[in-house]
Amino acid sequence: MISYDKDKYNEMARIVKAMAHPTRLFIIDTLKRQSYCVIELTEMIGADISTVSKHLTVLKNAGILWDEKRGNCVYYHLLSNCVLDFYQCIITVIERNEMREA
Amino acid sequence: MISYDKDKYNEMARIVKAMAHPTRLFIIDTLKRQSYCVIELTEMIGADISTVSKHLTVLKNAGILWDEKRGNCVYYHLLSNCVLDFYQCIITVIERNEMREA
DNA sequence: TGCCTACTTGCCAAATGTGCCAAATAGGTC
DNA sequence: GACCTATTTGGCACATTTGGCAAGTAGGCA
């Protein structure tokens, strides 16, 4: 009998939830190329800097990013490259969805 | 200059959000072995059947599951096996988080 | 036809997530 | 120390998600 280990799946959901936002997916996708500081990411995203800072904190708390203070700026880095493998899967799902709708 | 293609990341977030719930992660993990009907999953999960049905609908609408009526029951199947690759990555993230906390 | 089982849907209260503004903090530079 | 820039935090309104109950639907079977 398969049992639902709530603690295990809660912990996993915490990580997935951290990725479950368009801005945060963009941040992960952008940081795979190189690291950026909060201001640079804010310019790309076009939201309030406090909003971007909070998104970065969510990803950092999930263990997906780490941050590094350099001079006046805080640079964010991708910590878990494996999350990028997921992107191709998601795109595959989207493309198949579009095919089925057509 | 990298630009934030909101439509693209919204669409991707829709799929990730569908997975961003402990019960739904459990369902995906369980259906990788074999298909189950709503009642069977409800017994494993221990929630109201309407709650489980709604979770299944979320995953179906995201294109992660498909359903098939057989006799009196609706069987749900995993449509996108690639989402399972993500599980190992999440577990790696969790394990590293635990190491860093220790 | 009527009943039963297996679901799905509507509704609603509670919980959670989001985004902006304003205020606080933290380091560098003069 | 005073000031400036970069970032984080607090607070709040608004939107979304969640879960259970009750009601509705759909097909099988006597």
Image (cartoon, coloured by chain):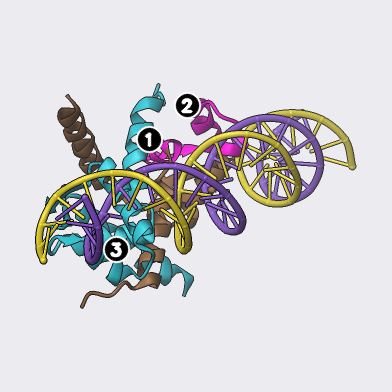
Chain colours: A cyan, B brown, C yellow, D purple
- Is mark 1 in CB contact (under 8 Å) with mark 3? no
**Badge 1 and badge 2 in a common chain:** yes
Q: Do labels 1 and 3 share a chain?
A: no
In three-dimensional space, the C-alpha distance between marks 3 and 2, rounded to whole angstroms, equals 36 Å
The quadrant holding residue B11 is: bottom left
Q: In which quarter of the view is residue A27 placed?
A: bottom left
Callout 2 amino acid: Met
Q: Name the residue under label 2.
A: B44
Q: Nearer the viewer, mark 3 or mark 2?
A: 3
| Residue B78 forms part of the magenta stretch | no
User: Residue B30, how many percent across, how many down?
Assistant: 37, 35
* Chain to which the residue tagged by mark 2 belongs: B
- At a point 48% along the width and 70% down the height, the residue shown is A101
Rendered position, B52 above or below A98: above
As drawn, is A84 to the left or to the right of D21? left
- Examine the structure image and report whether residue B41 is included in the region drawn in magenta: yes
Q: Which of B101 and B66 is in front in this view?
A: B101
Residue found at x 42% / y 46%: B77
Circle 3: residue type? Phe
Q: Is residue A32 left or right of residue D21?
A: left
The residue to which callout 3 is attached is A26
| Residue A58 in view, yes or no | yes
Does A30 appear above or below A59? Answer: below
Q: Give the range drawn in magenta.
A: B22-51
Dominant secondary structure (helix, strand or loop) of the stretch shown in magenta: helix
Looking at the rendered structure, the secondary structure element under dot 2 is helix
Q: Residue at x 31, y 64 (%)?
A: A91
Quadrant of the rendering where the N terminus of chain A is positioned: top left
**Which circle marks residue B30 in the picture?**
1
> Residue B56: where, in percent of width, then height?
51, 45
Which residue extends farthest top?
A: A1
